[in-house]
């Protein structure tokens, strides 16, 4: 029995999230369907985590056991991509040890969020980025991003991924970059994320950069105090870009 790790890329617009659901089109469901087409007899692939409906990925990780594949891993990649739809692809594949689990073995996950400020609609840019009508205070944006670094209780920014799960997370990267085309990109890495945490982080930082709350409000929220504006950044600006593992992958 061989276990394979695959890196997936997908346009989340056509999926009701990554996790398999009854009567809904999902990334996991499409991947399992493609595997069945080439002789896989398993019941479920393992996923590194779930992404919301509309969220994209360039580095989602999945794993599965395939005891009937006798060809090189590269041939498996080609066979899968031949059966997968246009909005989902396997970018990389490799054999891994039999106990590898893409979720529980992960040491960090990284996301990127894109937005831009423009008063007029721009359908091509808006497919993968949040369009804001007004500008942002760069200093406030950078200060709020810095405040998120470290280990905090992020209860004000998301909900646990399990019924009795903790809301404490450690953020090791949190920064904004301005691209030459005027696009803002938020890069964030943590040991794990709460449900909808990244979209909430982006929304609050934008609110601070537009004067609707302050950096102090964000700092208080991380200590379980105060109140922040309600809302989430749209899903279509968000992409899962990498899941990192330790020495054994």
Image (cartoon, helix red, strand yellow):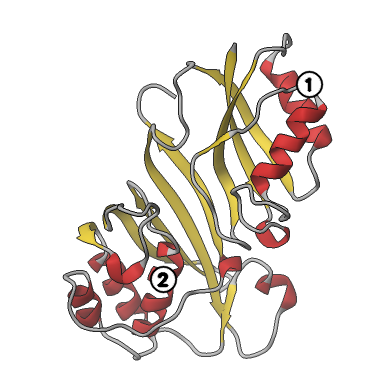
Q: Earlier in the sequence, mark 1 or mark 2?
A: 1
Q: Residue at x 72, y 46 (%)?
A: 88
Kindly identify which numbered label has been placed on residue 249. Answer: none
Find out whether the residues at labels 1 and 2 contact each other: C-beta distance under 8 Å.
no
Q: Residue at x 50, y 64 (%)?
A: 113
Where does residue 50 sit, x and y in percent of width and height? 52, 50
Where does residue 242 sit, x and y in percent of width and height? 48, 44
Q: Residue at x 51, y 90 (%)?
A: 134
Specify the quadrant that holds the C terminus: top left
Q: Residue at x 44, y 20 (%)?
A: 99
Report the residue marked by disc 2: 200
In this rendering, is residue 96 above or below 241? above
Specify the quadrant that holds the N terminus: top right
Between 8 and 65, the residue placed more toward the observer is 65
Between 134 and 225, the residue placed more toward the observer is 225
Report the residue marked by disc 1: 39
Where does residue 26 sit, x and y in percent of width and height? 68, 51
Disc 1 packing (10 Å; few <14; some 14–19; many ≥20): few
The number of numbered badges drawn on the structure is 2
Spatial separation of the CA atoms under disc 1 and disc 2? 41 Å
**Within the image, what quadrant is residue 168 found in?**
bottom left
Q: Residue furthest top?
A: 70
Does the image show residue 183?
Answer: no
In this rendering, is residue 70 above or below 241? above
Kindly state the secondary structure of the residue where label 1 is placed. Answer: loop
Is residue 1 left or right of 25 when viewed as pictured? left
């Amino acid at each position: 029995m061989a276990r394979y790790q695959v890196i997936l890329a997908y346009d989340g617009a056509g999926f009701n999230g990554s996790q398999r659901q009854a009567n809904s089109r999902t990334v996991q469901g499409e991947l399992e369907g493609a595997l069945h087409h080439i002789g896989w007899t398993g019941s479920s692939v393992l996923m590194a985590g779930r992404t919301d409906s509309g969220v994209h990925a360039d580095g989602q990780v999945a794993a599965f056991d395939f005891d009937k594949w006798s060809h090189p891993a590269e041939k498996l990649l080609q066979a899968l991509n031949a059966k997968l739809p246009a909005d989902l692809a396997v970018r990389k594949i490799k054999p891994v040890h039999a106990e590898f689990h893409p979720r529980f073995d992960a040491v960090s996950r990284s996301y990127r969020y894109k937005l831009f400020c423009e008063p007029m609609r721009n359908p091509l840019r808006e497919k993968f980025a949040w369009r804001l009508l007004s500008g942002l205070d760069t200093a406030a944006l950078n200060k709020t991003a810095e405040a998120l670094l470290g280990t905090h209780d992020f209860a004000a920014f998301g909900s646990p991924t399990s019924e009795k799960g903790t809301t404490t997370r450690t953020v090791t990267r949190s920064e904004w970059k301005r691209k030459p085309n005027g696009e803002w990109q938020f890069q964030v890495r943590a040991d794990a994320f709460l449900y909808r945490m990244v979209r909430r982080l982006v929304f609050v930082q934008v609110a601070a950069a537009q004067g609707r709350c302050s950096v102090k409000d964000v700092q208080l929220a991380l200590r379980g105090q105060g109140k922040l504006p309600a809302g989430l950044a749209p899903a279509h600006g968000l992409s899962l870009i990498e899941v990192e593992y330790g020495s054994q992958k």
